[in-house]
Image (cartoon, coloured by chain):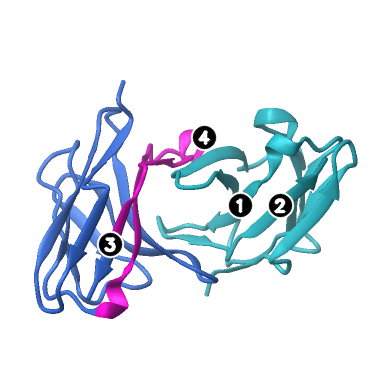
Amino acid sequence: NAGVTQTPKFQVLKTGQSMTLQCAQDMNHEYMSWYRQDPGMGLRLIHYSVGAGITDQGEVPNGYNVSRSTTEDFPLRLLSAAPSQTSVYFCASSWTSGEYNEQFFGPGTRLTVL
Amino acid sequence: AQSVAQPEDQVNVAEGNPLTVKCTYSVSGNPYLFWYVQYPNRGLQFLLKYITGDNLVKGSYGFEAEFNKSQTSFHLKKPSALVSDSALYFCAVRSGTYKYIFGTGTRLKVLA
């Protein structure tokens, strides 16, 4: 059981470049989400999904796109990277039912935009 | 709007002493409340949650938290701190939607 995996671990981009952060889970969880972690700001929700084909915006969605074509995968796309997107990005997954809804987090991707 | 406040950036406690990390929240409806811990260069790990039922919730590594509806608080506690408990702790809340709101985190430092 690999849990939640994220690739890459580190990435450096130039302003204006695009890229996709990969996230996969093998627990058959319906819910998946993306967060960014910045000093003094805690974790902020970017996008989330409650199942294949269903996505919705979180607190800070601008500049990011997501899709959910399978239960396992939830990639995050940066359309045109900006220095303000320098951050650590975490993917998480969970069941949606009330009793078992604690999130499992991936190890994170540290992104620097120059 | 949902919100979570962790009023202390850092909490220092001596090893063996009890610890408390504070969290207050604001949601409409019944809250789902969580505590997570983050060790350096790692993702977050689930510690405990309150969904319904007993106000005192027990979790991993000897941690517990008390849900107080009138004070809208969910403070994390441990009777006897260990040096290995030193980490960054996050409180989170979710209400009827699937949007989770996290606090800004509290760094716990346990001194030997």
The secondary element bearing badge 2 is classed as strand
- Residue B89 lies, in percent from the top left, at 62, 51
Percent across and percent down for residue B107 are 66, 56
User: Which label sits on residue A99?
Assistant: 4
Q: Which residue is at 17% across, 51% downward?
A: A75
Residue B9 shown left or right of residue B102 in the figure: right
CA separation, marks 2 and 1? 6 Å
* Chain appearing in blue on the rendered image: A
Amino acid type, mark 1? Leu
Identify residue for label 1: B88
Any part of residue B31 in sight: no
User: Do the residues at pointers 2 and 1 share their chain?
Assistant: yes
Q: CB atoms at circles 2 and 1 under 8 Å apart?
A: yes
Mark 3 to mark 4 CA distance (whole Å): 34 Å
Q: Residues within 10 Å of mark 3 (few under 14, many from 20)?
A: some
Q: Earlier in the sequence, mark 3 or mark 4?
A: 4
Q: Residue A70: where, in percent of width, then height?
A: 12, 40
Which sits in the foreground, A68 or A13? Answer: A13
Q: Which chain is cyan?
A: B
As for residue A88 lying within the magenta part, the answer is yes
Q: Which residue is mark 2?
A: B108
Looking at the picture, do discs 3 and 4 lie on one chain? yes
In the rendered structure, which amino acid carries the disc numbered 4? Glu
Kind of residue sitting beneath label 3: Leu
Q: Is residue B44 above or below residue A16?
A: above
Q: Is residue B95 left or right of residue A81?
A: right
Where is residue B13 drawn, in percent x and y?
84, 50
Highlighted magenta segment, given as a residue range: A83-110
